[in-house]
Amino acid sequence: MNEVADLFTLKGRVTVVTGGTRGIGEMIATGFLQGGAKTYITSRKADACEAMQKKLGEFGECVAAPFDLSTVEGCEAFTAFIAEREDKVDVLVNNAGASWGEPLDVFPEEGWDRTMDLNVKSIFFLTQKMLPLLRAAAKAEGRGRVINIGSVDGLTIPQMENYAYSASKAAVHHLTRVLAKPLAKDRITANAIAPGPFVSKMTAFLLGTEAGQEAVGNQLPLGRIGAPADMIALSTFLASPAADYITGTTIPLDGGYTNAR
Ligand SMILES: NC(=O)c1ccc[n+]([C@@H]2O[C@H](COP(=O)([O-])OP(=O)(O)OC[C@H]3O[C@@H](n4cnc5c(N)ncnc54)[C@H](OP(=O)(O)O)[C@@H]3O)[C@@H](O)[C@H]2O)c1
C-alpha cells in the first residue's frame, strides 16, 4: 500500500464540475479524471458539452450534458439527470460563473442579476438539490465535498469595474463558510478556491495574448499567471482524502496577489 498515493486518489469517486466545458472547469475536470474519478460536467451549450465529453474521454469516464444553472429549475434538472445515473456524488465543484464589467454610473440591473444568479444563487440551490447524493457519498465513503470557485476579486478591491462580480465572489467565500457548518454534521466539507488570473474565455480580454499574460504575470509576486497544473493540484487536493480535516476555508490560488504583495 502506498499511503501517500491513497491520500490523493480519486478512484471510485463520482465528481461533478459545473462550467466544465472550458477554462478553469476544464482544468479541474481533467485533474479529476486523471485522478481516477468519474466526472460529470455541464454548461449551457450542447455542442460544447459534446466536444468536451469527447476530449476529456481520453483521461477517463466523462459525461457531459447541457443545463442552465442560473435558475432553480436548471439546478433541479441537472441534479435529476445525475440521480438517474448515480446513487451518490462525492464531489460537487460549483465552478460555472459569469462576469459583467461596466462603469459605476451606468452599471445595469441585467448585469447585476445575471452575475448574482449564476455566481451565488446557483451555488446555493445546486448544493441544496445535490444534498441527498452528497449525503449518500458521505455515508458510503466517510466523506463528501463541496468546492466553490470564488475569486481574488472577492478578497481584494478589483482592478476592473466589476461591481456585481466582486460582490458575488465575496458572497461565495462567505456562503462557503456558512454552508460548512451544517454540512460538517454529515462529514461533508465545503471549501472555496479564490483564483487569480488563469487563461480562459472570461479573461481573454486581458490574457488572450502571450504579451498580455506576461504583463499580468509580472505584476504578481511569483511572476507569472496561473497554470492548469496549479488549478489541478489544489482542486484535486481539496477533493481527495488528504483534505478530510479542512472545511469552511477559502484558499487564494493567485501567485501571492492577495497575501504577498
Ligand atoms: N479565469 C480566471 O482568471 C478566473 C479568476 C478568478 C475566478 N474565476 C472563476 O472561475 C470560474 C470559471 O471561470 P472561467 O474563467 O473558466 O470562465 P469561462 O471560460 O467563461 O467558463 C465559464 C463556464 O461556465 C459555463 N456557464 C456560463 N453560464 C452558465 C450557466 N448559466 N449555466 C451553466 N453553465 C454556465 C460556461 O459554458 P456555457 O457558456 O456553455 O454555459 C463555461 O463552461 C468562474 O466562477 C470565475 O468567476 C476565474
Image: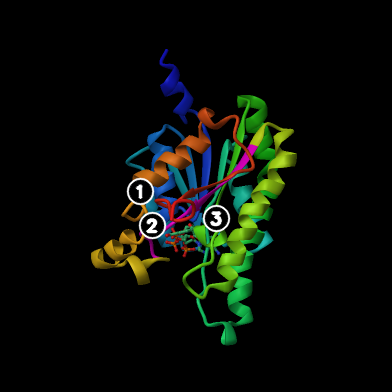
Q: In the rendered image, which quarter is residue 125 located in?
A: bottom right
Sequence-wise, the earlier of marks 1 and 2 is 2
- Residue picked out by circle 1: 228
Q: Position of residue 42 (x, y in %)?
A: 50, 54
Residue 180: say if magenta.
no
The local secondary structure at tag 2 comes to loop
Amino acid carrying mark 3 in the image: Gly
Q: Are marks 3 and 1 in contact (CB under 8 Å)?
A: no
SS assignment at label 1? helix
Q: Do the numbered discs 1 and 2 sit on residues whose CB atoms are within 8 Å?
A: yes
> Which three-letter amino acid code belongs to the residue tagged 1?
Pro
- Residue 19 seen in the current view: yes
CB of residue at label 2: within 8 Å of ligand 1?
yes
Q: Position of residue 90 (x, y in %)?
A: 58, 35
The residue where tag 2 is placed is 198
Q: Residue furthest bottom?
A: 105
Q: Who is closer to the viewer here, 183 or 213? A: 213
- Which region of the structure is painted magenta? 189-201
116 relative position to 98: left or right: right
Check residue 150 in the rendering and tell me which mark sits there, or answer none. Answer: 3
Farthest left residue? 210
* Residue closer to the observer: 50 or 113: 113
